[in-house]
Amino acid sequence: MANPMARSFLQAVASEEVASPLRVVQMEGLTVLKIIKHCKEFSPSLVTGQLLGLDVGSVLEVTNCFPFPIREEDEEIEADGANYQLEMMRCLREVNVDNNTVGWYQSTLLGSFQTAELIETFMNYQENIRRCVCIIYDPSKSNQGVLALKALKLSDSFMELYRSNNFTGEKLREKKLAWVDIFEEIPIKVSNSALISAFMTELEPESPVSQCDYDRLNLSTAPYMERNLEFLIECMEDLLSEQNKFQYYYRNLSRQQAQQQAWLQKRRQENVARKAAGEEPLPEEDPSNPIFKPIPEPSRLDSYLITNQVANYCNQINGVAGQSFSRLYLMKALHDN
């Protein structure tokens, strides 16, 4: 008779192999404040830091974080940065604080974070961590009265394609991967302990209106809109240059195909003459001929990232413009009354 304990253990191991999808990122309120403080202190410079916590089922708990030091370009960034991370995690472990790496956070300027460097960092983390996220904080957008905090991860289909380093049009159509399928945004849930919640309730003022509420009524959105439009124009120019690369590639491909057809037709005529003379026909393909050398297709990764960035700027402009019109109509109604 089989041991029921052995069966349950094997079932548990089998269930652990199938990881549940990540549903939510649960962040401690103190960790969120640390990230905001670090990013705002060095704004508009971009900063990064480490996220620490636990991976529990479908929830990724972020319980602590620490910033990475800002170093000059001529210093040994990689070696010093790795030593700094190890030393910080060793110190946290000695004081019995969560020291499991679950990702990193970084600041951004007007949402310009969708770059090839971000993808490379994700892939480097994925080599050692099964599931990790990147927390993006935008101080410039937060100045408009909105907490611009989002958690991102790479989609599984994109990571599989990135490992093969094959971003041709045929492969993308085969995988049915569109430009919106690169990143996945995970909902963020901010949690506090009961003691901290009670303390914050005691500190809450009697007035229901806070400074953040006044910031939402600010009518001056011109600088924010101008910067978004400037970045959008730059992205459109980059997208145009990427399209020119593909047009150049397809022109060369059409020219090569025409040369191949002309060469093949000429070779067939030669073979007809050789057969008539009783000679062996020549092969209809010559690998040594340059016209049969395949032209490498440009990668579509950059165009996908630029398209993502363009969509992000358009959404930001649309959101700010809609809020601005609402404020102006509100002020007009108050002025008329």
Image (cartoon, rainbow, N blue to C red):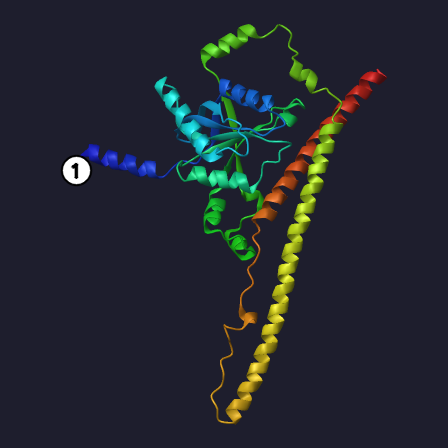
Q: Residue at x 61, y 48 (%)?
A: 303
Q: Residue at x 59, y 82 (%)?
A: 266
Q: How far across and how far down the image is residue 173, in percent?
A: 54, 54
Q: Residue at x 37, y 24 (%)?
A: 90
* Circle 1 residues within 10 Å: few <14, some 14–19, many ≥20: few
In terms of image quadrants, where is residue 111?
top right
Decide which of 149, 271 is in the foreground and name it. 271
Which corner quadrant holds the N terminus? top left
* Amino acid on which the number 1 mark rests in the picture: Ala
In terms of image quadrants, where is residue 92?
top left
The mark tally for this picture is 1
In terms of image quadrants, where is residue 334?
top right
| Residue furthest bottom as drawn | 277
Q: Secondary structure at mark 1?
A: loop
Q: How far across and how far down the image is residue 178, in percent?
A: 57, 47
Residue position marked by numbered label 1 in the rendering? 2
Q: Is residue 180 visible?
A: yes
Decide which of 98, 185 is in the foreground and name it. 98
On screen, 178 above or below 77?
A: below
